[in-house]
Amino acid sequence: MTTTEKPDYKVIGTRPIRPDGVEKVTGKALYGADIHLPDLVQGAVLRSPHAHARILSIDTSAAEAMPGVLAVVTHSDLPVVADKVLDMGEGASTASDMSKNVLAADKALYRGHAVAGVAATNVHDALTAIEAIKVEYEVLPPVLNVQDAMRDDAPLLDASRHTKTPTGEESDNASNVAAHNRFEGGDVEAAYAEADVVVEREFDTKMVHQGYIEPHNGTANWNSDGTLTVWTSTQGAFAVRGALAELLQLPVSRIRVIPMEIGGGFGGKIGVYLEPVAALLSRKCGRPVQLTMDRTDVFQATGPTSGGHMKGKIAVKDGKITAAEVSLAFEAGAFPGSPVMAGAMCMLSPYEVENFKVDAYDVVVNKPKVAAYRAPGAPNASFCVEQLIDELARETGVDPLQFRLDNSAHEGTRMITGVAHPRIGQEETVQAAQASDHYNSPIEGPNRGRGVAGGFWFNAGMQSSVVASVNPDGTVNLIEGSTDIGGTRASLAMQLAETLGIEYDSVRPTVVDTDSVGHNDVTGGSRTAYASGQAVYEAGLDIQQQMVARAAQLWECEAEDIEYVDGALRHTSDSEKTMTFAELAGKQMETGGPLQGRGSVVARSPGAAFGVHVVDVEVDPDTGKVDILRYTIAQDVGTAVHPAYVEGQMQGGVVQGIGWALNEEYYYGEDGRMENASFLDYRMPTSLDLPMIDTIIVEVPNPGHPYGVRGVGEVPIVPPLAAIANAVHDATGHRFTELPISPRRVVEELHNLQ
């Protein structure tokens, strides 16, 4: 549905085929591990068998003496780096922490922590060699959740780490709490005293995996001239280049990162794991080195999303939310940098809340350093807030969607950060869900229930660059540096075609390496279609202006006398003088030479996105199994550039949210060993677990983009956790406050009620 008058676009809003589709379905697309170079050798990584241990010594001599072994590296081969903050796009870390995560220094901080790397003539020799490396450990007790880690007597991961407090100072005592931030406004205590209803609960979520299929990989060639070339599957080639420059102490100009096709990421392919190790090994052995993780390595040694513990308290008077107090403690993994701040800023943003107090704790634990996962931090935090809102609606006797509408944020509403919302579609999205066939149909039968929840993501802007080259036949090559992880080749080509007034098929998009285009920030945060789309629009305007100037040259008139409309140029006062885009493209040599348009932006108005989900479930009280019967998602997408891709993003986020809500978790033993480090044991949803997912596209154009585009990919994963929990409560009468709502948990909690 469209909630505002939509311009009559010619390309935007259509559903063309994706430009990379044929290569991918025929197996011709090259992914990270598909790169084969002359003299390429294989590598392997030795990983800690302990979740927390002091490294007393590493003896690599036996491995180095083995046949076929060409190089061995440990943390001592990495340069000493400062505590400079590196922000790779979704979550910041210091260079020092990143270096210690790539290869453990004095401590192994999680099971699977990389300790050493080996390069050999073949994989078999490399794997044999890592077994010959002798590491002496002093095993220490691990801390595996935020409650234990925050205790005064908890074992410390880093005895030199102190809590950064809300005042900017550091705590006196060392702590596993890396940071404590607070947002505060109004008077929550006074609001509680005057409230009609106050609800308060605690909630827990577990670490979960992003679910990408392609394992991490990295191939590096340290060239004889001192330059470094890296091939990798990444969401941000420029982010990888920047991290490598800092970790290896190289000038950025001496590093070239070539992004390969990417077999899924969802935030999990932003950080670096293997690339620095491959580079060190290549420098030592003088040959290109390739490293690829197996599935167990991916689970044990790369970043999942945070688990956490949350406490929430919300008050209502006369049907309006008057106060909210929420404490979030998120697992950062072995090094600081959980998405707790993002969660804190997102969870209340769909609503008007004048009195609030929000505490956010970033807590280190003996698990892998966390990575981003679609709307990082927001699903966990909304699992808390949206259940409390559901409970408030029940306590006050108001329909749950109407309660949300009555309390919805709108243009001018200030978030807890103090920033006012621009034009947003929160109210329109709730209304779309209210009007849906799903919400207006009865939910009948025993053990069945319906739940709703809302979600928010602020979306990202950041930096993007593109170059568009006009060919003599009127086609255009679009050169971009943003990894295509959600159909952005097509969406950017469509925006350029719209700007130039030409056919979509006339634009050929190509994702290139870091030497071939200006800086592009990571593909993440739902920024690419928006921010790179702005750069594409600028490049299109650049081409238009140059074409007008060239037509003026040919027609011997002023540029002001020429109009560029729908891919054609015409003289405003001489109707005989017209020329198509393709005709002028064929006259480049006689009008000044090759014609290129350039766009470089720092996009600052990404436009927040909102979603509302409705779900019906059936709970088997004997087996504990929860079946999803029906699911509808309504979301404000700004302008749907390619509606099929938009629907796919919406449905994909729901699928991942269903898995997170019902089955998925990193299951750790008391010794810090992950017990389900395979897709056989880590239960992701299959088609048998899913209903048809209905989508309602709400279009409230983003005023900060020429075509009204808002990011789409983050919000769909935010509401499912709470929506499903609310539906299960509706079916059973019991409030589930811990994820996943697995058959075991359902049976146990319902049995305990009896």
Image (tube, grey):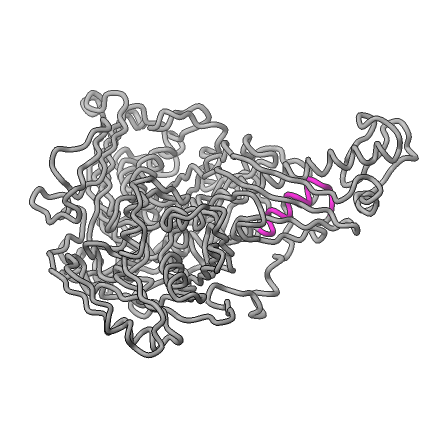
Q: Is residue 329 left or right of residue 413?
A: left
- The x and y percentages for residue 333 are 25, 50
Q: Nearer the viewer, residue 238 or 726?
A: 238
Magenta span: chief secondary structure = helix
Magenta range: 489-502
Residue 491 visible from this viewpoint: yes
Can you give x and y, in whole percent of width and height, for residue 32 in the image?
47, 63
Q: Is residue 388 above or below residue 680?
A: above
Q: Residue at x 40, y 71 (%)?
A: 42
Relative vertical location of residue 436 with respect to residue 512 in this rendering, above or below:
above
Residue at 51% over, 59% down:
260
Find residue 1 and report its horizontal and vertical position in percent: 56, 41
Residue lying at 25% horizontally and 61% vertically, measured from the top left = 115
- Residue 158 in percent (x, y) is at 17, 46
- Which picture quadrant has residue 464? top right
Q: Is residue 9 visible?
A: no
Q: Is residue 539 magenta?
A: no
Between 338 and 62, the one nearer to me in the picture = 62
In the displayed structure image, the side of residue 305 where residue 745 appears, left or right: left
The C terminus sits in image quarter: bottom left
Looking at the rendered structure, the number of numbered marks drawn on it comes to: 0
